Image (spheres, rainbow, N blue to C red):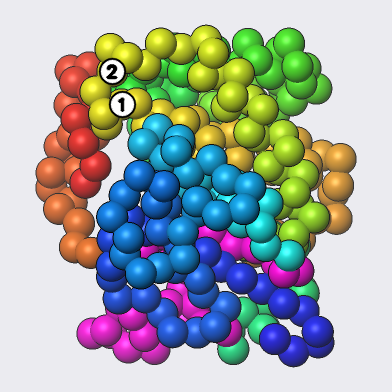
Amino acid sequence: MSNNVSAKIIIATHKQYHFPSDSIYLPLHVGKVDKKDLGLNGDDTGDNISAKNASYCELTGLYWAWKNLSEDYIGLVHYRRHFSYSKKNSKNKFENILSEIELKKLIPQYDVLVPKKRKYYIETLYSHYKHTHYKEHLDYTRNILQSNYPDYIASYDKVVNKTSGYMFNMFIMRKELVDEYCRWLFPILLELESLIDSVSLTAFHRRFYGRVSEILFNVWLEHYKITNPRLKIKELNHIHMDKINWFKKGMSFLRAKFSNKKYEGSF
């Protein structure tokens, strides 16, 4: 990249897919340690937690990037969910994925690139999690913060009572910020493992570490902005590469809120 600024965006995936060809992207087979080889780079080399992928989801990819990449900016996206800076083709979504040329325009102007906030309107982040998953996950997380990071409690309480947030575990950040975030995040998740018995949960609900971390990212960023008010954040559009059944998704959202019927799978 220009101005001697380097960037690498890992694409967390568990299958072969149509990946962008720009050199800034690195498709990464997450959970590769116990999976069939896809012929891709895997999160099972170097310092890694690949074996935790069944519960940590894309976070095993984030951990790998944190420990094994050295570019100036590190990013995390998903095989079916990408950042988009401009709409170049109304028919081919893949042509609208953030390109290296577009990224050059954004860095080093900004410290953090995030997807535009997801709005829940009639739910807070806490109530939505409570209705769709198990609130104990967040309650235990707050207890960990109270014990180990008490200065984050005000930010936590503020974030979980909002009706919107930066979701999907997607971002592009300066490497030193990724380092700081991960040094904070992963010890929290490790302690959470010791507090919650996930044996009785379905495979879908055992993946709560990835969901809790979506909220924790907002908490960390909220707190970081307080101590670093000059932090420059840019919100970008994101695009979903597969079709979404919005009717099914909307009905599941309403059933969760009004009938306490928890989600049973991804959409």
| Magenta region, residue range | 71-100
Question: Dividing the image into 4 quarters, which one contains the N terminus?
Answer: bottom right
**Crowding near pointer 1: few (<14 within 10 Å), some, many (20+)?**
some
Q: Position of residue 135 (x, y in %)?
A: 42, 15
Determine if the magenta segment contains residue 97.
Answer: yes
User: Residue 205's mark?
Assistant: 1
Direction from residue 259 to residue 80 in the image, left or right: right
Residue at x 46% of width, y 73% of height = 84
Task: For residue 170, say whether it is visible.
Answer: no
Question: Residue 82: which quarter of the image?
Answer: bottom left
User: Residue 254's mark?
Assistant: none
Q: Nearer the viewer, residue 142 or 227?
A: 142
Direction from residue 191 to residue 261 in the image, left or right: left
Q: Position of residue 205 (x, y in %)?
A: 31, 26
Question: Residue 23: which quarter of the image?
Answer: bottom right
Q: For mark 2, give the secondary structure.
A: loop
Q: Nearer the viewer, residue 122 or 66?
A: 66
Residue at x 50% of width, y 51% of height = 44
Q: Which residue position holds label 2? A: 201
Residue contact between numbered discs 2 and 1, judged by CB atoms under 8 Å: yes
Q: Is residue 133 above or below residue 164?
A: above
Q: Is residue 5 above or below residue 33?
A: below
Q: Nearer the viewer, residue 46 or 197?
A: 46
**Crowding near pointer 2: few (<14 within 10 Å), some, many (20+)?**
few
Residue at x 86% of width, y 47% of height = 228
Task: For residue 41, say whether it is visible.
Answer: yes
Direction from residue 179 to residue 126 in the image, left or right: left
Q: Mark 2 belongs to which amino acid?
A: Leu
Q: Mark 1 belongs to which amino acid?
A: His
Q: For mark 1, give the secondary structure.
A: helix
Q: CA distance from mark 2 to mark 1?
A: 6 Å
